[in-house]
Amino acid sequence: MNAPDRLPVLDPAALAAHTARSWDEQIVTQLTDYIAIPAKSPMFDPDWVAHGHIDQVVQRAAAWVEAQRLPGLSVEIVRLTDAQGQPRTPVLFFEMAATRPEPDAAAAPTVLVYGHLDKQPEFTGWRRDLGPWTPKLEDGRLYGRGGADDGYAVYAAVAALQALRAQGLPHPRVVGLIETCEESGSGDLPAYLDALRDRLGQVSLVVCLDSGAGNYEQLWLTTSLRGNVTGTLKVEVLDEGVHSGDASGVVPSSFRILRHLLDRLEDSATGRLLPASLHCEIPAERLAQARATAAILGEEVWKRMPWACGADGGPTLPTTTDPVEALLARTWRPTLSVTGAEGLPAIGNAGNVLRPSTAFKLSLRLPPPVDGPTAARELKALLEADAPYNARVTFQPDGRVGAEGATGWNAPSLNPWLEQALQTASQDQFGTPLGYVGQGGTIPLMNLLQQGFPQAQMMVCGVLGPKSNAHGPNEFLHLDYARRLTAAVAQVVAAHP
C-alpha cells in the first residue's frame, strides 16, 4: 500500500525570504512609480476623470497583477456609473481560486483582501529634499504620498499568495477589493459591494491592509476604528468686505460668531465634546487591551508626535501623559479638528478689512459605535439653530445625501484559530507576541462588511507605524515592516480552517 501524500509543512523562514524578494525585486519599483502619480481622491480632485491619475494607478496595478501569471489568479477593473450616468471611481477586483479541495464549492470560505489606491492631497511642510509626488528611498523607508496609505496593499496581497504557492501550501479562495474612493469616505463603495456581492462569495475572513501599527517590532491587530463626520461650517455677515475702522463695533465679526458656534460643540478649555450622544461607554475588553498596549509602548504613545517648542522653549505638552488615557483618547473618545479655512487672506495680504464671511472645514472623529449619518444630522442642527445676530450660518456635511458621515467599527471577538494564527505569525515573522491596538482613523468599508458578513472574522492591520505620517508631510513606508507583514498575512491565509 502506498503511503498517503503528505501535505507540505509551512516554513516561516522560506515565506519571509520569498516575500522579501518580491518586495526588493518588484514591489518597491512599482510603489516608486505609484507615488509619482498625483492620484488624489475625488474630494480633493473634482476633475479626477479628466486628469486620469486614478485610472492610471488602477491600470498599472492591474497590469502588474496580470503580469505575475499566477495560476488561478484573474484580475479586472470594474467600472460603474451613478444614477445620473456619471462614472464612479473604479475598483480593482482580483480572484485567486482555492488550492485545496472544498467539499461544497458553493459554501466554501472566501478570504477578502481590501486596500485602496486613491490618495490624500499634498499638504505642506515636507522636508526640503522630499515631496508628495517625489519618491525617495532612504534608510529603509520609501517616502512619498500614498505608498503606505495604501498603495502597497494590492502588491503585498499578491506577493503573499505567490509565497504560498512557492511552498505548495493549500489555501482557500481569495478575492481582492481595491477601491479608489476611500479618502473621500468610500461613497462609491456600497454600489460596488452590491454589484459584486455574488462574486465575493462566502466571506469568512477579511484582511484589511489599510491600518496602523503601534511599533515596527511586532504584528499589530486593529481592534477598533473611529467614525468620522467632515463638512464645512460657514458664517456670512456681509455681502462684501468693509473697512474695519468704519464697521467694527457695529458689524459682528464672522470669526467671533463661528467661534461662538463651536462653543456649542466643544469645551475649548479641555477639548471635550459636549453633546452626550457623541460619547459611548468603552467596553471592558478594550480597556484591558489599552492597558496592555500602554505597557508595551509606554510614553512613546505621545512622545512620537512631532512636537513644536512651547512657550518656555520645551516641547508642547500633550493633553495627557498617561499612556492608557492617551490611547483611549485617540480611539474611543470623540474629538473635533479644524482642518481648513476660507475667508482668511494670507497675512501678507491682510488689510484692515472686516471680512464678509469665515468658513472652517471640520473633522469630527466619533467613537466606534456612534452612528455617523445620525451624528452628521445632529451636528448640522446644533450649529445652524438660532444663529447669533441672525447671521447666515450653514453646515454642509461631506458625502452622499442621506449618507453623510461614516460609522466606526468595533472588531468582533476572535475565533480561536485566528487568534492562534496571528500569534504564531507575529512570533515567526517578528519574534514578538501579537499586539492589540485601536486606531483613531476611519475605514468606512469595515462597518459595511461587518453588516454584510456578520459571521466573518477580521484581520485589520497595516504599515502606518510611528512617524509614518499618513495624510501629512514626509509620509513614508517602512519597508522591513511591510516585508514582514506580507509574510504574516500569507501565514494567516494558510492557517484558515
Image (cartoon, rainbow, N blue to C red):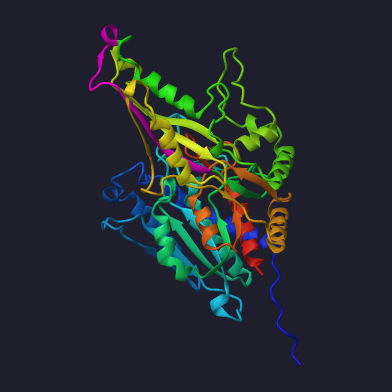
Query: Residue 245 colored magenta?
Result: yes
As drawn, 398 above or below 4: above
Towards the viewer: 271 or 466: 271
Which of the 4 quarters of the picture holds residue 465? top right
Residue 273 pos. (x, y %): 54, 31
Quadrant into which the N terminus falls: bottom right
Q: Does residue 101 appear left or right of residue 393 in this picture?
A: right
Residue extending furthest left? 240
Query: Residue 266 colored magenta?
Result: no
As drawn, 291 above or below 420: above
Residue sitting at x 61%, y 56%: 459
As drawn, 6 above or below 44: below
As drawn, 446 above or below 70: above
Quadrant into which the C terminus falls: bottom right
Residue 250 pos. (x, y %): 30, 11
* Residue 363 in view of the camera: yes
Residue extending furthest front? 386
User: How many callouts does the rendering have?
Assistant: 0
Residue 367 pos. (x, y %): 57, 42
Span colored in magenta: 227-247
Residue extending furthest top? 245
Residue sitting at x 64%, y 41%: 281
Q: Does residue 250 appear left or right of residue 102 in this picture?
A: left
* Residue 131 in view of the camera: no
Residue 238 pos. (x, y %): 26, 21
